Image: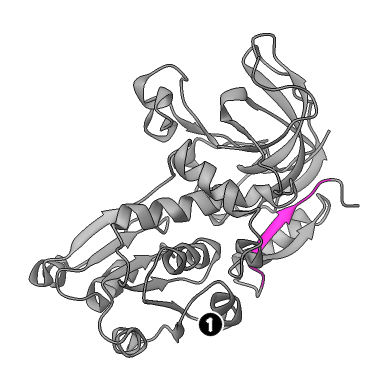
Amino acid sequence: MKAAIFDRVGRPLRIGEVPDPTPGGDEVVLRVEACGICGSDLHITEDPAPFGIGEGFVLGHEIAGEVVAVGKSVTTLKAGDMVAVVPMRGCGHCERCRSGDPARCVEMRLIGGGYAEYVAVAARQCHILPDGVRVSDAALAEPLAVALHCVVRSGMKVGDRVAVLGAGPIGLLIAFWARRLGASHVVMADLHDHQAERAYVLGATGFALSNDKLADHLADLCGGPPDIVFECVGKPGLLQAATEAVRLQGKVIGVGLCVGGDSWDPFVALSKEIDLIFSVFFHQHHEFGIALDVLGEGARFAPQTIITDRIGLSPVPQIFEGLRRRTTQCKVLIQPEIA
């Protein structure tokens, strides 16, 4: 089958042929209908060692597709089922896995394989799509669930003032959930304003350009220092910026994947007595299911707004490299059937 393949740091992905997958006993093979390009995929190709990625790896964990083959022990799925995939694969039998929290399983691994025509996944990772959810949109369930988990972790209350640093897909979806769940103000900040219109469509109430006056800008747009600041970029210095912007005894939620370390002065956090919370992944049964349901609503603040491009496999290397340079694109979905 055709796939976009990672070889090594500094070299673009390449389109090549890899063996067709076959299902293990507890697995199914999916025809990939859509797979999102995630910011963490970009991080992985810049520093693959912490992720255990090597030559010949096929990236892609935001996956939706059609079941085309099932393993011998699979009873919950059949050929023709349309599913979205939870990319955290745990052991399947520990307490965490049984409760729907495979991200916290000691054997958890984040799967790839979605940048291809077919992929094999465990049947327990698959959720059959609810009525009204298009399989071509269902790859958004994973980032939607990640964003929902961030808001849940924050303990946000109705009426809270919220700021989101970083107008990438996760930041935009956090704004979507924060407004949907009752925040009075949702102000986004970014180095550029090309996602401002999209932010407003998703429910943001304000948009600020990041600079040395960021804390003042956020306070002006929020009607006071924000109660909660989500850091969704993962670049050195932004946890400090979030700490300086949040109100006394407020909360900073670390979301961005910062690889390689950061420098941080905890004195401001201590003097303001803030809560610093980190958020990663999501709950498979609750948050992923809610994310899938909202994709079928057709609501005013539709999360599908973040989709800017749908591409086949052939242009993936070029688009992937372009995303490193912060283009005006937002969420790019790979749909292998597109020529």
Q: Which residues are magenta?
A: 329-336
The residue labelled by disc 1 is 192
Name the residue located 54 percent from the left edge and 76 percent from the top edge.
199
From the top left corner, tell me how far across and down residue 69 is, in percent. 77, 21
| Residue 263 visible in the snapshot | no
| Placement of the N terminus among the 4 image quadrants | top right
In reply to whether residue 157 is colored magenta, the answer given is no
Left or right, residue 274 beside residue 279: left
How many labels sit on residues?
Answer: 1
The correct choice, above or below, for 103 with respect to 96 in the image is: below
From the top left corner, tell me how far across and down residue 22 is, in percent. 74, 19
From the top left corner, tell me how far across and down residue 146 is, in percent. 47, 51
SS at badge 1: loop
Crowding near pointer 1: few (<14 within 10 Å), some, many (20+)? some
The correct choice, above or below, for 302 with respect to 190 in the image is: above
Quarter holding residue 200:
bottom right
From the top left corner, tell me how far across and down residue 271 is, in percent. 8, 71
Q: Give the color scheme: rainbow, by chain, secondary structure or one colour.
A: one colour
Name the residue located 44 percent from the left edge and 85 percent from the top edge.
208
Q: Amino acid at mark 1?
A: His
